[in-house]
Image (cartoon, helix red, strand yellow):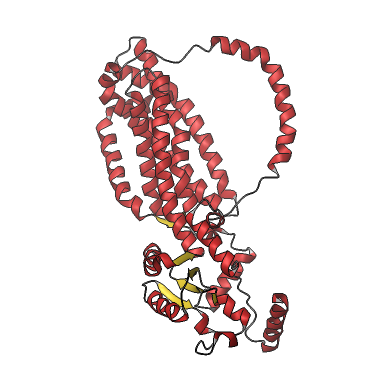
Amino acid sequence: MNWLAEKTIKYKGTIIIAFILMVVFSIFAAPNVSINYQMADYLPEDSKSTVSLNLMNKEFEKSPPNVRIMLEDVSIAQALDYKEKISKVEGVKEINWLDDSVNIEQPLDMIDTDTLNSWYKDNNALFTVLVDKGDTLNQTIEDIKEVVGDKGIVSGDAVTENYAETSTSEEIQKIMLFVIPLILLILMISTSSWFEPFLFLFTVGISILINTGTNIFLGEISFITNATAAILQLAVSMDYAIFLLHRFAEFRDEGQDVKEAIVNAMKKSYTSILSSGLTTILGFLALTLMRFKIGPDLGTVLAKGIVFSLLSVMFLLPVLTIYTYKIIDKTHHRSFMPSFEKFSKVALKVGPIVVIIVAIVVVPSYLAQGKNKFTYGASSMASSEKTQIGRDTKKIDDTFGKSNQVVFIVPSDDPVEEKKSEKRLIILKV
């Protein structure tokens, strides 16, 4: 590693230029990375759900409705007026209501009760709408909400997907605003310079930005990966920078000049950094063995992120240290970390007791982990009354009942079997 450390310092200008070019590319590429919010797209290709969805998309151009709209306290005429306005919203491909099933010019008491209550109940009207789930989804949902105003409540898969997209982005920003100051505080306490924490975060931040931008070469990533990759990369790779600068500080304390200290720090810390980094990379790459494609999606992005973190720490951080060592020296402060000598002695004494406690806790913990409940996809947002979409969904469900779209496909070349299937479904409904 001697030659690598020396070459890094020798060509520090080239390294800075290379990272600047990668950062500029990533700034423009990151906003253009396609984010997929459809969990069904990550099912194994040979799963029954995937095979069925592929067959449906092949045989039928029309998809099931993905939005439910309830209008409160409206007459039949008003409902028809709203239906006309909603149908003109860009992105709305189809809208269905009572008038598509029966002749609404006849008196309401002459319409089948079940049919009527499915669309119009207690002066509330329920529309089922199919909207395009492309790039204009957000605008389509917003336009629909604007049309229905206070009278309307909107829910459904497309609304949930849109909510997941906007809320995930907002929540990640809130998390970052909380996590970064906390990390800075911890680093300021544990390091010997007020400037070092900012150098750590800057270096790792550069690697996160580059990783985010290079996701464009993957075609698209899931919203789960998009939401978690940056935070996980920050948490996992911060140690690498600390290893290097801690070594640098030790050699400076021994009286070595800046260049000699950083070169020796690189030589001494590279083994630890690479060992830790490669272990983490292999751990993330193990996710790519999952048949559920969220694993390969998340594992690939995180493994790539650790590679960029290693490159940033091994090449960019030493160069930045050379350029900023005067600031590090001027902002030097005493260590605020207490001595752990007494703690270590106590830990050795209570070690056997801790082992016994852990052994006792392992069994109930193993049994308890099998009782955990999990939610999948963005649908859990619609089931939680803590969110607006959850409250709206519940209100529609309380009025018109729950809706769960199921597509039943039968061979089109066998009319007899098709009729039998229809009768079976009618019996199941009853």
* Viewer can see residue 398: yes
Residue in the foreground of this view, choosing between 222 and 133:
133
Q: Residue at point 30% right, 43% down?
A: 23
The quarter of the picture where the N terminus appears is top left
Q: Residue at point 71% right, 83% down?
A: 423
* Viewer can see residue 220: no
Image coords of residue 428 (percent x, y):
72, 75
Indicate whether 75 appears above or below 105.
above
Residue in the foreground of this view, choosing between 308 and 73:
73
Indicate whether 323 appears above or below 153.
above
Residue in the foreground of this view, choosing between 415 and 249:
415
Image coords of residue 213 (percent x, y):
36, 48
Image coords of residue 323 (percent x, y):
25, 25
Image coords of residue 420 (percent x, y):
72, 84
- Among the 4 quarters of the image, the one containing residue 246: top left
Indicate whether 386 appears above or below 15.
below
Residue in the foreground of this view, choosing between 298 and 369:
369
- Among the 4 quarters of the image, the one containing residue 20: top left
The quarter of the picture where the C terminus appears is bottom right
106 sits to left or right of 11: right
- Among the 4 quarters of the image, the one containing residue 345: top right
Indicate whether 406 appears above or below 283.
below
Q: How many numbered circles are shown?
A: 0
Q: Residue at point 44% right, 59% down?
A: 162
334 sits to left or right of 398: left
